[in-house]
Amino acid sequence: MKHTLRRFCAALCALALCLTPVSALSVEQALTLLENHYVDPLPDAAYRASTLDELFSAVGDPYTYYMTAVDYEEFSAGVEQESSVTGIGAAIEYTANGIRITSVLDGGGAKDAGLQGDDYIIAVDGVSCVPAAEAHRSLIIGEEGTFVTLTIRHADGSVRDYRIERRSVALHNTVVTVANGVGTVDCNSFGSQTSAYFEEGVAAHDGDVEHWVVDLRGNLGGLADAAVGALGVFTGSGNKLFYRLNDGSSFYTTYLADALTDKPVIVLVDGSSASASEIFSGGVRAEEAGIVVGSRTYGKGTAQNVLDETRYPELFDGDSLKVTTYRFYCADGNTTDRLGVIPTLLVDDACADAVAALLRAEAPKSGEYLSFPLNGHVFYVDLSAAGEISAALSALFAALPPDLTVSRVSGGKVVSRLDPADTAKGLGIDYVDRRFTDLADSACSAQINTLGVYGILAGDGKGHFRPDAMLTRAELAALLAQALNVSVSGSERFADVTGERWYSGSVNAVTYLGFMNGVSPRYFNPDGTLTQEQFIAVMGRLARFLNFHADDYARERTVPPDFDALAPWARVEASVLTEYDGNMLYAALDAIDPHAPVTREQAAATLCNMFKTLNLLSY
């Protein structure tokens, strides 16, 4: 059911982004609306547009577009993802042992009959469903009010027939289930009712669980207020979301109620988790309500308003204009724009379920287990069946930060306290090493290896980082682009950065975002090096982009005389890096020669310090 809803939502979003506008809205009217509401200044090309297609192409924002009345209705339905189906009222999957019931739905005949998750349908009206296939679905569905007889094999091996009434059952975008001490909130979209589903589910079941899992994989977003309400269930009152407009003004959204649980939450994400999903997962990370597991999220850190007839009755009649109006920042002031949310445990999508299933919020009563702290909580892994879970353990160890200490406990006593690599070796578990092999003499090895574990540094692809080498301008662009997960192709901004160069997309991206400049309007000098003060200015701009509060600090900062060793254009950024929340540079500012070149290890260490200081890497 979840995957069907995800595909439906993805199809709607793709349709909305690809449709050619056909509207009663004129180019002049649309241009006026964009001037009043769009988050950034409009490019010159927008004023030369003669059609809406040309106008939106010039703006270059995939989230700003015109919707016909039909498009608008479908867009609203895609956000809500509320519908109904007629059947037995159960989510199912097809297995060699029969049709497995994964969950039962409120109001359905399956729940009234007492069926549960992990029950198997082995026959329908006497027709065997072993092995099960999609073709067996037609035996189960039927008209509302009719009955079907299911032969069920329960978990204890008993077999019994049930006569189930087919009913129309509501499908919600959020479903809460509890099994084996784990509460799971499966959320496909953040609609107007989503926060109520979170509140009701957690309030009803919190006493029955050790921890919560919130599955946001494939969740493309929805309503920001719904994400804030869902987040508050786990974090309690406080400012949850900050918005900034293009004139520098800002406002925030506050959650006023107490948290409904003090249990840790594991948030599952993937590359399709976007927008409101990132508000929730970034908020959990920011407020240490739990951990985030999976791959890096999509990176949509802007908010849109839909302009329609309720606000402009003279311009719209069922149609609308969706406009990017704000950039948003999570509870700790960090943006998800471009960057996304970096998971606490970065694991392959295929391993995320298995890794999350390993983690417990309470220590096992007996036997051998592991314990380790992550983002304000201690998690435990039961080793009683280590052989059966070795693949998941291998994925878990590879994702653990290298400076984390893992405690191995046996018989109630700590047997060892080691780093993840040595712990895995002691257990005989395969360790997929994401660290670099040429850092033995580097004073920055811990920071460099941390970025390697989180996929922020790639090195040369052969395990080498070359820490002592001078950093070229192209290498810094590539480092920042990989950290931000951005690339811009097809736009040759400089004569010496052409499309076939390995760094072209990175240079285009970081200069477009304003972190780096060319050495002249036409040349970037990719093989040139940077001075320390040039590097400091670039990294200070990055910090201001990433964090709302760091940018506010810079806007209000009066730089003291002891920054006079730096050029004036680098002083404000230097103050952000050294004074906003401690020193993010690889060394004390007064120990750095402003005119010396920058090494690769110095750049990596500064980036790691920044990400940890700003809480973008939180473990």
Image (cartoon, helix red, strand yellow):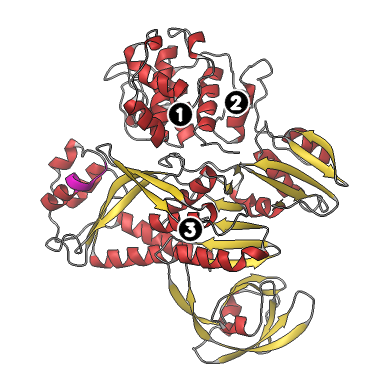
Q: Which residue is mark 2?
A: 447
**Residue 230 disc label:** 3
Q: Which residue is mark 1?
A: 480
Can you give x and y, in whole percent of width and height, for residue 614 in the image?
A: 49, 33
What residue is rendered at 33% in x and 66% in y? 74
* Quadrant assignment, res 435: top right
Q: Is residue 568 magenta?
A: no
**Residues under numbered marks 2 and 1 in contact, where contact means CB atoms less than 8 Å apart:** no
What residue is rendered at 53% in x and 41% in y? 342
Q: Nearer the viewer, mark 2 or mark 1?
A: 2
**Label 1 amino acid?**
Leu
Q: Which residues are magenta?
A: 34-39
Q: Is residue 67 visible?
A: yes
**Label 3 amino acid?**
Ala
What residue is rendered at 64% in x and 55% in y? 353
Q: How many marks?
A: 3
Can you give x and y, in whole percent of width and height, for residue 440 in the image?
A: 69, 18
- Quadrant assignment for the C terminus: top right
* Quadrant assignment, res 91: bottom right
Task: State how far apart marks 3 and 1 are (Cα).
Answer: 32 Å
Can you give x and y, in whole percent of width and height, for residue 111 in the image?
A: 61, 80
Task: State how far apart marks 2 and 1 are (Cα).
Answer: 15 Å
**Residues under numbered marks 3 and 1 in contact, where contact means CB atoms less than 8 Å apart:** no
563 or 140, nearer to the observer: 563
Tell me: 149 left or right of 458: right
Which of marks 2 and 3 precedes in the sequence?
3
* Quadrant assignment, res 548: top left
**Label 2 amino acid?**
Gln
